[in-house]
Image (cartoon, grey):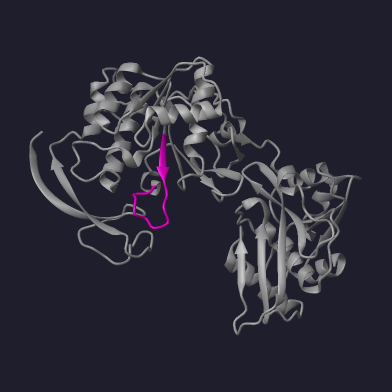
Amino acid sequence: MAKSGKTSIFFCQECGYESAKWMGQCPGCREWNTFVEEPVTKMEAGSAAMRIASAAGTGRKGITTDPISLNDVALTEGTRMSSGIEELDRVLGGGVMQGSLTLIGGDPGIGKSTLLIQVCRNMSSSGRSVLYVSGEESAVQIKMRADRIGAFSGDMKLLCETNLDIIAEVIRNSKPDVCVIDSIQTMYNEQVSSAPGSVSQVRESTQVLMQLSKVLGVAVFIVGHVTKEGTVAGPRVLEHMVDTVLYFEGDRHASYRILRGVKNRFGSTNEIGVFEMRNEGLVQVSNPSEYLLDGRPMDASGCIVSCSVEGTRPILIEIQALVCRSNLGIPRRQALGVDHNRVNLLMAVLEKRCGMHLGDQDAYVNLTGGMRLTEPALDLAVVLAIVSSFKNTAIEHDVIAFGEVGLSGEVRAVSQVSQRVSEAVRLGFKTIIVPGSSLKEAQKSAGKNAQVIGVVNIREAVDKII
């Protein structure tokens, strides 16, 4: 293809923002020192993605050159395929959609490739044709990992290649039901002059895969690595291009993994799936509340259980707080799993509204199980845990609390009270602390199985529980 010109442009490695000159801070994501210079080759009309889509020979389904009326569009349900993993199907909205493009991101070593190999095993065993493309591992390495997970009985093909033209040709010829690209940072397109892993290469490669997915009806999974340093073009550059974005959360050294859906064109967002990493791979946790509460202390101060709703699922989790006198000029405040600034705000509310002198106290707040939750419904439980540790008084083990705390110390209502109360009753909690405005709804859900206490401010909650 004839080239009409060659120039350079600066890209932000964190969010993909483009600029004609280098800037210290990205205007898009506000990160510092993330701009890199990449050569950009201007080509004639018709990108590589469009050429590959045209070469598929099947025509572009459902796409016309003339605008049509919205009333003339036929609404049909897409074809979903079960992945064989209920937690993953829940996050995807009911299964893997045919012709979808799904991005799975997360830190290296957290379990992205392991999960996808398990998906390939289940779908190939159910009669689906699967193509696994790896640009990081050899066929022997993939075979060793697959044997560790379990025996494969279906039609699963391996391709160890990084050239996108070759990969596209194989996909067109084999037309698999499911294709896995591991990872997008290793793919390169010969039409783009920048190095593999750059923003230009990642964008162009994803564009090609998107066209193949829509034209051939192949469900494509893309693995994207995330690094804190931003040295590799992260998957946030691709979020607007794909249909579904899933992120693995949790410490790679911890046993639990959280798969969170942050974008889904075929289902609800903010759904989560809980997995446990074992020797045989990722094992789904169908009842995460029981796992997260297993082994909690019964008579320790600073411990209380709260309930958070992630998507459509209520999850009970233990909140631990440790408050002690500081030996430093500036007290230390540390939070794991919750927002650090939120903890500081709640401590300031306690000091102002309840008269507790916490200005010279170190405070540590932790969510057990490696979970990271930001829902305001945890505020009341965090307050009670801090007060319990500060007074060195244990809270009864069958007490659960949830509610949002305002700057005036008031306890505000939260959503989905019935689901939270029902989950607490199911797991045997006898005392449930709820916002006063939600008392009637909570009592109706609890019935005679638990005592429901409504509180209007944190002072009332502290007096009744501690």
In this view, the residue in front, 442 or 173, is 173
Q: Is residue 400 left or right of residue 123?
A: right
Q: Is residue 444 left or right of residue 193?
A: right
User: Would you say 363 lies left or right of 40 here?
Assistant: right
**Going 26% across and 65% down the picture, which residue do you hit?**
23
Quarter that holds the C terminus: bottom right
Residue 232, magenta (yes or no): yes
Q: What's the magenta region?
A: 222-234
Please state the horizontal and vertical placement of residue 75, each as a whole percent of the image: 48, 25
Between 249 and 297, the residue placed more toward the observer is 297
User: In the image as oriented, which residue stretches furthest toward the right?
Assistant: 448
Magenta part mainly helix, strand or loop?
A: loop
Residue 152 place in picture, x, y as percent: 51, 20
Res 37 → quadrant = bottom left
Q: Residue at x 69, y 55 (%)?
A: 414
Percent position of residue 391, x then y: 81, 73
Label tally: 0
Q: Is 400 rendered above or below residue 90?
A: below
- Residue at 21% x, 28% y is 51
Name the foreground residue: 211 vs 198.
198
The reply to whether residue 407 is visible in this rendering is: no
Task: Indicate yes or no whether the magenta region holds residue 228.
Answer: yes
On the image, the x and y values in percent for residue 165 come to: 24, 29
Q: Quadrant of the N terminus?
A: top left
For residue 51, above or below residue 432 = above
Report whether residue 68 is seen.
Answer: yes
